[in-house]
Image: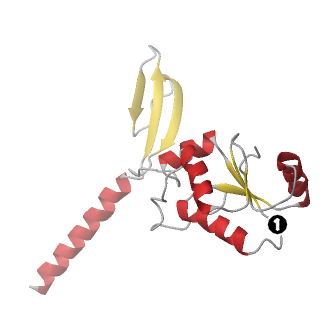
Amino acid sequence: MPRVRLLLVMIVSLGTVIFSASSFAQVYKWVDAQGKIHYTDTPPMPEVAKSVETKKAQGNVIESDAQPFATKIAAEKFPVSLYTFAGCGDLCDKAKALLDKRGIPYATKSTEEDKEALKKLTGDSQIPVLVVGNKTPRRGFEESAWNSLLDEAGYPKSNPLANMRKPTPNNSATQP
C-alpha cells in the first residue's frame, strides 16, 4: 500500500511540473505574406513569416492601481499640495493625519522656495495651507472646511484602501 501511495504522489507531482512548465512557454506573433496575424508556440519558417515577435507568456494576473478610481480622477483634475514648515506642530500633524486618513495623495511643500511661493500665493506664510488644484487655498487647519474642499474636488470621504495599507504622500504632484 505505501508503494501505491508513493507512486501516486510521484505521478501527481510530475504532472504538476509538466503542466506548469507550459505556462511559461514563449508565444510567437507573426504575419504571413497575406498580412494575416498568427499566434503560435513554435517559431514560423523564415520563408513564411514577414515579421516575427517573441512574447513571453505572462500569468493570468489582473493588475490594479494603487489608488481607488475616484481618487485617481480627482488627483488628476485637482492635485493636492500641503504647505507645512518646521515648527508648525500640532496643526500640521492634524492636517497630514486628515489627508492620510482619507487616502489623499499630496505633495508636501516645506522648503524655503516653497515658503516664498506660499507668500506669493496667499500673501503671507501662515501654515498649514491646503491647495487643491485651482481652487482657493485654505489657510490654517479647520477640518470641516478642508473636508468640504476635498469633497468638492471629488475625493472620496473615506479611504477604501485604509485596511490594506497606509497611503504614502505623493511628493511628485504638480504644484498648482
Q: Nearer the viewer, residue 56 or 100?
A: 100
Q: In which quarter of the view is residue 140 placed?
A: bottom right
Q: Is residue 20 visible?
A: yes
Looking at the figure, which quarter contains the C terminus?
A: top right
Q: Is residue 167 left or right of residue 81?
A: left
> Which colour style is shown?
secondary structure
At mark 1, the secondary structure is loop
How crowded is the residue under tag 1: few (<14 C-alpha within 10 Å), some, or many (20+)?
Answer: some
In percent of width and height, residue 44 lies at 45, 31
User: Is 36 above or below relative to 24?
Assistant: above
User: Residue drawn at (53%, 44%), measured in percent from left and top?
Assistant: 154
Looking at the figure, which quarter contains the N terminus?
A: bottom left
Q: Nearer the viewer, residue 64 or 51?
A: 64
The residue that mark 1 highlights is 85
User: Is 33 above or below relative to 78?
Assistant: above
User: Residue drawn at (86%, 58%), measured in percent from left and top?
Assistant: 125
